[in-house]
Image: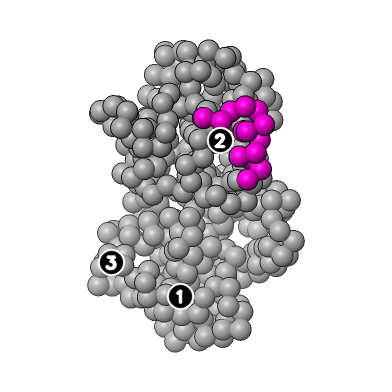
């Protein structure tokens, strides 16, 4: 069987991680089928793969005037099935059945988070994916319901396959954080957020909730915010300053994986108050590092955390501050959440993800 994968999103953060891990783990478990990996640059061909995998350099995803080249490359390979690893980029008039992975449905659930241009493109691309796809893979039951409710796609042709977490994310046996924190100018224990600084991530509420903490707890605990210095960064920096939190709220920028794992491990808790998520990688990473999680009580969060986190109203300052204070002072609660989180994180496994995806591919070998 000949399977094509559109891996041109490999350089992006969330979708890129999914793309890299799926290719890597399919290569481990399947030496029988033939895989054609479509990329838009040779520099991403560094992934270790087995002999039944082949890279094909094609046109970029957003290059509309070169879309004919991508279609030609797909036709030339004579594929049995094509997997669009990001549903935004399903090919027009493909020569074989198409499987699409939907990572979110933000255009329907939270359109305000997208620019007018992105909203229009996403609306068109999502409808195209719905019309062309023979099968859909999605990352949560929450997202599956979104697809069914908004597009009435056949529920029997939608598979929920949870994302995994890299085995690099694990608890440290040695929690001596002094020299690491010193490098970033952090002197106290800290609450931790990692992710983008887009408005819907609701970081302003997190900063306000931190500012409202009991003074003694605030004196002993800082707030660390990791993510690229873009989108709402300057507004958030200004908010922290206006609340007299200089030296207490630390913006540490985009982190490479080693530093990210360090920040998880040395934190007292990971917190996200995002107003939209279909999965949320950082929650699973935090649990795998043995860190308690505070998260919203809606969307995909209850499904992904499954009784391992403190869930709350992401817009209720009083409730958020109270949860942070509980984490800071209640060691028994922390230990309970850590234990549950570690156990649950083992279920988020990239090899298991790849096995389930391969099973879907093989449904089309019988057609």
Q: Can you give x and y, in whole percent of width and height, for residue 94 in the image?
A: 55, 78
Q: Main secondary structure of the magenta part?
A: helix
Residue that numbered label 2 is attached to: 272
Q: Nearer the viewer, residue 45 or 184?
A: 184
| Residue in view at x 58 percent, y 52 percent | 230
Q: Can you give x and y, in whole percent of width and height, for residue 319 in the image?
A: 64, 21
Give how far apart the Cα atoms at labels 3 and 1 are: 18 Å
Q: Nearer the viewer, residue 76 or 181?
A: 181
Residue that numbered label 3 is attached to: 49
Q: Is residue 362 visible?
A: yes
Residue that numbered label 1 is attached to: 40
| Residue in view at x 65 percent, y 58 percent | 153
- Relative to 31, is 318 on the left or the right? right
Give how far apart the Cα atoms at labels 3 and 2 are: 35 Å
| Residue in view at x 43 percent, y 23 percent | 188
Task: Report the span colored magenta.
Answer: 234-247
Q: Can you give x and y, in whole percent of width and height, for residue 246 in the image?
A: 56, 30
- The stretch drawn in magenta includes residue 240: yes
Q: Is residue 167 visible?
A: no
Is 212 above or below relative to 362?
above
Mark in the foreground, 3 or 1 = 1
Is 217 above or below relative to 88?
above
* Residue 53 occupies quadrant: bottom left
Q: Which numbered disc, 3 or 2, marks the residue that appears first in the sequence?
A: 3
Q: Secondary structure at mark 1?
A: loop
- Circles 3 and 1, Cβ within 8 Å, touching? The answer is no
């Amino acid at each position: 069987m000949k399977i094509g994968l559109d891996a041109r999103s490999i350089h992006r953060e969330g979708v890129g991680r999914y793309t890299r891990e799926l290719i890597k783990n399919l290569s481990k478990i399947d030496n029988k089928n033939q895989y054609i990996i479509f990329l838009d640059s040779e520099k991403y061909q560094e992934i270790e793969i087995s002999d039944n995998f082949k890279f094909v350099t094609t046109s970029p995803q957003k290059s509309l005037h070169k879309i004919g080249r991508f279609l030609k490359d797909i036709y030339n390979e004579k594929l049995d099935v094509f997997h669009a690893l990001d549903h935004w980029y399903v090919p027009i008039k493909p020569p074989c059945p198409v499987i699409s992975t939907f990572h979110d449905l933000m255009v329907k659930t939270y359109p305000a988070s997208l620019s007018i241009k992105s909203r229009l493109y996403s609306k068109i691309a999502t409808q195209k994916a719905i019309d062309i796809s023979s099968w859909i893979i999605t990352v949560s039951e929450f997202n599956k319901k979104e697809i069914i409710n908004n597009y009435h796609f056949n529920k029997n042709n939608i598979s929920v396959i949870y994302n995994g977490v890299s085995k690099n994310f694990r608890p440290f046996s040695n929690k001596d954080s002094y020299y690491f924190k010193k490098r970033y100018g952090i002197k106290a224990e800290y609450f931790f957020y990692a992710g983008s600084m887009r408005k819907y991530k609701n970081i302003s509420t997190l900063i306000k909730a931190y500012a409202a903490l009991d003074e003694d707890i605030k004196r002993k605990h800082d707030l660390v915010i990791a993510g690229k210095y873009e989108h709402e960064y300057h507004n958030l920096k200004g908010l922290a300053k206006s609340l007299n939190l200089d030296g207490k709220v630390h913006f540490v920028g985009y982190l490479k994986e080693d530093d990210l794992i360090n920040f998880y491990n040395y934190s007292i808790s990971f917190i996200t108050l995002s107003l939209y998520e279909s999965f949320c990688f950082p929650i699973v990473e935090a649990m795998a590092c043995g860190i308690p999680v505070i998260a919203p009580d809606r969307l995909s969060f209850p499904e992904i955390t499954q009784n391992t986190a403190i869930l709350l109203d992401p817009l209720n300052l009083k409730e958020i501050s109270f949860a942070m204070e509980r984490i800071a002072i209640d060691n028994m609660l922390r230990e309970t959440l850590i234990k549950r989180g570690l156990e649950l994180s083992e279920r988020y496994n990239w090899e298991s993800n790849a096995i389930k995806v391969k099973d879907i591919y093989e449904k089309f070998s019988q057609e």
